[in-house]
Image: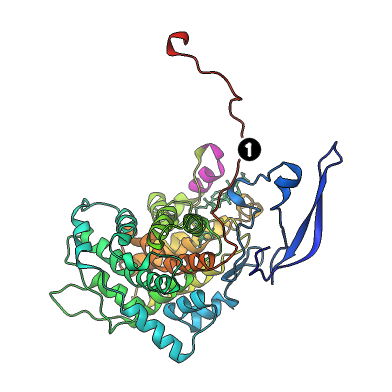
């Protein structure tokens, strides 16, 4: 185990190759909570065999102290603190400090940290010109991915990953600038002037300001909406070794600069099976159109030939309710009430769909429950956020998790370049034949 490992080898697992007298004994290692792991690093050397786990459903890719998920119990802890308590009592910037540094900040620590983030919200003025190169109807995730990847072309003083000071500045720059870049992607798509960040506003308030304000008139914050936005950011901040976080870790393991790593994470998040699901849920509800069409849609989902998924449902880890979905659903009711939206057809549809699905054995037997994306889109739409910006908002929040996981990996003295192997089932060796011989 790595020298920083909290894990302790308490027992062993013996692997014996059938039909041979060859076997090896592997350490069984325990973390602080959660399943033990079999440390298989010497398996290939001892027995000449690999493990096989496409999709890494049963593989611990790293040791981490940041986020813990118990999928069966529907538990999510950030550095040991339950997500329910953080969503209720904390805020996004404090959670960012918690994920990055490992514990809740003292008032002095929080003051220094929040000032550090605030001081990095502006981007180099030439970055504005990148936007002119995109079509107006470019998807904001395409713009976000491109512009964040290009940050390393501007900030040469924070790409040496071996320098702790440069790692810290890169972390501040990414957490602080991604909201600005994201908001400008939206403004560009609607042809409105870019709004510069305001250092007198809180993190979520500032993001809503840059999204919704215009130079022509003063902007008024709605504290309920900025509180809801802040809570949504908290819920999306980190989630263990999900696909985009694993992408960031793999990119970071090569020594790539942090801006390139986060751009890789943004690209991975965009997929509809991952962070793109919130946008896909709204599209799905719109296509269904009205509650009486739900049974036919559910029948289509259950027909494997259709390849139709119930977006916002299911999870690789949660085989119970996603705790974030529960909080999101409560927040949805709060925001709609605050906005005076009595009956939101999309919410009615979503709740009816949830009711039907959770009574249907197809979903119950497969332990498919609403995940974080099922209700988030409905809140965001009610807050006036366009559907195309839903995954962008997910990326704004998850940048904190990605940077925290990247920092943990870079600072692990035992980390090595990630390089999975494979089960090869292609052609065995054969000789080249010139095209004249190929009839
Ligand atoms: C996120 O990993 C993370 O932590 C991600 C995330 C984070 O914070 O980073 O939580 C964010 O990505 C949430 C997930 C958002 N995606 C969606 O809502 C898209 C819809 N969901 C599915 O595509 C699916 O549930 C996944 C991708 C989320 C999980 O895929 P798995 O692990 O391959 O699903 P599974 O093995 O649990 O599926 C078991 C069965 C299969 O059927 P059988 O082969 O057993 O007959 O359930 C079926 C699946 O086909 N199934 C679904 C389904 N999800 C799984 N059937 C219909 N609708 C669905 N949504």
Query: Can the viewer see residue 342 in this picture?
Result: no
Q: Is residue 353 rendered to the left or right of residue 379?
A: right
163 or 227: nearer the viewer: 163
Q: Is residue 299 on the magenta stretch?
A: yes
Q: Can you give x and y, in whole percent of width and height, for residue 233 in the image?
A: 42, 71
Q: Residue at x 60, y 60 (%)?
A: 62
247 or 286: nearer the viewer: 247
All told, the count of numbered labels is 1
Q: Is residue 18 rendered to the left or right of residue 299?
A: right
Give the image quarter of residue 145: bottom left
Q: Is residue 220 rendered to the left or right of residue 53?
A: left
User: Can you say whether 232 is above or below 306 in the image?
Assistant: below
Q: Can you give x and y, in whole percent of width and height, for residue 141 in the image?
A: 34, 56
Q: Element under label 1?
A: loop
The stretch of residues the image draws in magenta is 296-305
Q: Residue at x 44, y 75 (%)?
A: 231
User: Can you say whether 154 is above or below 298 in the image?
Assistant: below
Characterize the local packing of mark 1: few (<14), some (14-19) or many (20 or more) Cα atoms within 10 angstroms: few
Q: Residue furthest left?
A: 216
User: Can you say whether 281 is above or below 215 in the image?
Assistant: above
> What secondary structure prevails in the magenta region?
helix
Q: Residue furthest bottom?
A: 107
Disc 1 within 8 angstroms of ligand 1 (CB): no
User: Can you say whether 119 is above or below 307 in the image?
Assistant: below
Q: Is residue 421 rendered to the left or right of residue 137?
A: right
Q: Can you give x and y, in whole percent of width and height, for residue 265 in the image?
A: 43, 57
Q: Residue at x 57, y 59 (%)?
A: 369
Residue located beneath label 1 in the image? 423
272 or 26: nearer the viewer: 26
């Amino acid at each position: 185990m790595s020298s920083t490992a909290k894990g302790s080898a308490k027992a062993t697992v013996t692997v014996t190759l059938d039909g041979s007298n060859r076997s090896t004994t592997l350490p069984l290692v325990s973390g602080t909570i959660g399943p033990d792991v079999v440390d298989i690093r010497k398996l290939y050397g001892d027995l000449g065999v690999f493990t096989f786990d496409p999709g890494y459903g049963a593989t611990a890719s790293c040791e981490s102290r940041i986020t813990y998920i118990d999928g069966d119990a529907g538990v999510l802890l950030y550095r040991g603190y339950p997500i329910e308590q953080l969503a209720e009592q904390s805020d996004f910037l404090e959670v960012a400090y918690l994920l990055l540094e490992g514990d809740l900040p003292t008032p002095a620590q929080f003051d220094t940290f929040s000032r550090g983030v605030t001081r990095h919200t502006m981007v180099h003025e030439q970055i504005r010109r990148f936007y002119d190169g995109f079509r107006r109807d470019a998807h904001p995730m395409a713009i976000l991915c491109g512009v964040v990847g290009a940050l390393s072309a501007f900030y040469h003083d924070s790409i040496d990953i071996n320098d702790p000071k440069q790692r810290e500045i890169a972390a501040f720059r990414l957490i602080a600038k991604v909201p600005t870049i994201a908001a400008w992607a939206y403004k560009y798509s609607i042809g409105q002037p870019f709004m510069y960040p305001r250092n007198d506003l809180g993190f979520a308030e500032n993001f809503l300001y840059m999204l919704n304000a215009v130079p022509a008139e003063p902007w008024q914050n709605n504290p309920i909406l900025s509180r809801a936005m802040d809570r949504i950011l908290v819920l999306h901040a980190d989630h263990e070794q999900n696909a985009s976080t694993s992408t960031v870790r793999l990119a970071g393991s090569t020594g790539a600069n942090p801006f390139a790593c986060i751009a890789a994470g943004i690209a991975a998040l965009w997929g509809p099976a991952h962070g793109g699901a919130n946008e896909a849920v709204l599209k799905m509800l719109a296509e269904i159109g009205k509650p009486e069409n739900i049974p036919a849609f559910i029948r289509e989902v259950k027909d494997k030939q259709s390849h139709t998924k119930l977006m916002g449902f299911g999870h690789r880890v949660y085989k119970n309710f996603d705790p974030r979905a529960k909080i999101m659903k409560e927040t949805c009711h709060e925001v709609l009430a605050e906005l005076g939206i009595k009956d939101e057809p999309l919410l009615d549809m979503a709740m009816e769909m949830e009711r039907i699905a959770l009574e249907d054995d197809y979903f119950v037997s497969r332990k498919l429950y609403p995940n974080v994306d099922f209700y988030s889109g409905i809140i965001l739409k009610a807050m006036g956020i366009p559907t195309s910006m839903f995954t962008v908002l997910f990326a704004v929040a998850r940048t904190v998790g990605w940077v925290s996981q990247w920092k943990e990996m870079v600072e692990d003295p035992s980390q090595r370049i990630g390089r999975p192997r494979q089960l090869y089932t292609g052609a065995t060796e054969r000789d080249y034949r010139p095209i004249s011989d190929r009839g």
